[in-house]
Amino acid sequence: MLFTDLSIAALLASTAAAVPFAGHDHSHRHLHRKQSNGNTFNINVVNSCSSSRSVGLFQITSAFQMLSMSTPVTLQPGENTTVAAPYQLAGMRLSGTADQGTAAQWLPQALFEFGYSAWGSVEGTAYDLSLMTGTTDGMSVVPANSNCESKSCSSPLDCPVSQAWTNPNQDAIGSPADTTCYYGLTDFDVVFCPSSSSSY
Ligand SMILES: *[C@@H]1O[C@H](CO)[C@@H](O)[C@H](O)[C@H]1NC(C)=O
């Protein structure tokens, strides 16, 4: 998604986040592999690329600032890590270039983009994959809650519009890459360079 769109989405999401949160009991929807507290969910990240990736979280604020939100973790090929992600923030992204600092995060690259979303009595995480022109890695995301959509592109050059943002013009056709998991706190599996036959 374009960062301008993302910023608008972030503003909308923060408005939506004004929906009263107290009293929501969604503990029955928790599908944790590791224990999270109520303010974070887990992103289990696998590096299936043939070289190392530096994994980290960033946030684009409504003032277009790029903030580092986690300590970068270097994954050698085949390695994985679990990143604790803030549940109630908008404009979030997980990148594989975290060691390159905040300025490099504006460049096209494989991203798992996500943010808090509330709609009426439901809440959860809005998310997408972004593989804009210039991206070299493929990426996949699988939510722990099977009611929610998985997305996968083994190559950014051969990626259906339903699976990832590859072009900002996809907003003209309803942003089919975007989806929301309205089941409260849900963990996600993210793979850099997934194989074409499966997510792993
Ligand atoms: C993550 O790494 C551990 C070893 O550190 C391994 O046992 C496990 O299967 C890996 N998980 C995935 C999803 O690759």
Image (tube, helix red, strand yellow):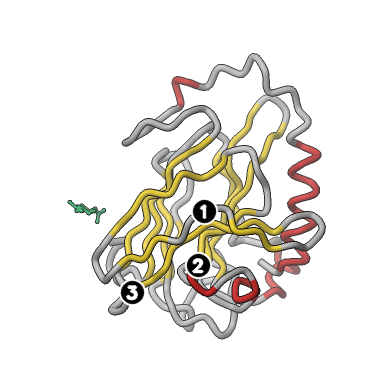
116 up-or-down from 159: above or below: above
Mark 3 residue type? Ser
Mark 1 residue type? Ser
Relative to 126, 64 lies left or right: right
Relative to 74, 149 lies left or right: right
Q: Earlier in the sequence, mark 3 or mark 2?
A: 3
Q: CB at mark 3 closer than 8 A to ligand 1? A: no
Residue 98: which disc? 2
Pick the residue in front: 88 or 100: 100
Secondary structure beneath dot 2 equals helix
Q: Percent position (x, y) of residue 47?
A: 32, 66
Cα–Cα gap, marks 1 and 3? 18 Å
Secondary structure beneath dot 1 equals loop
Question: Which of the 4 image quarters holds residue 153?
Answer: bottom left
Q: Percent position (x, y) of residue 84?
A: 46, 44
Badges 3 and 2: C-beta atoms under 8 Å apart? Answer: no
Secondary structure beneath dot 3 equals loop
The residue that appears at 75% across and 69% down in the rendered structure is 172
Which quarter of the figure is the N terminus placed in? bottom right
The residue that appears at 76% across and 42% down in the rendered structure is 14
Which quarter of the figure is the C terminus placed in? bottom left
Q: Earlier in the sequence, mark 1 or mark 3?
A: 3
Q: Percent position (x, y) of residue 89?
A: 65, 43
Residue of label 1: 70
Residue of label 3: 52
Front: mark 1 or 3: 1
Cα–Cα gap, marks 2 and 1? 9 Å
Cα–Cα gap, marks 3 and 2? 12 Å
The crowd level at tag 2 (other Cα within 10 Å; few <14, some 14-19, many 20+) is many
Badges 2 and 1: C-beta atoms under 8 Å apart? Answer: yes
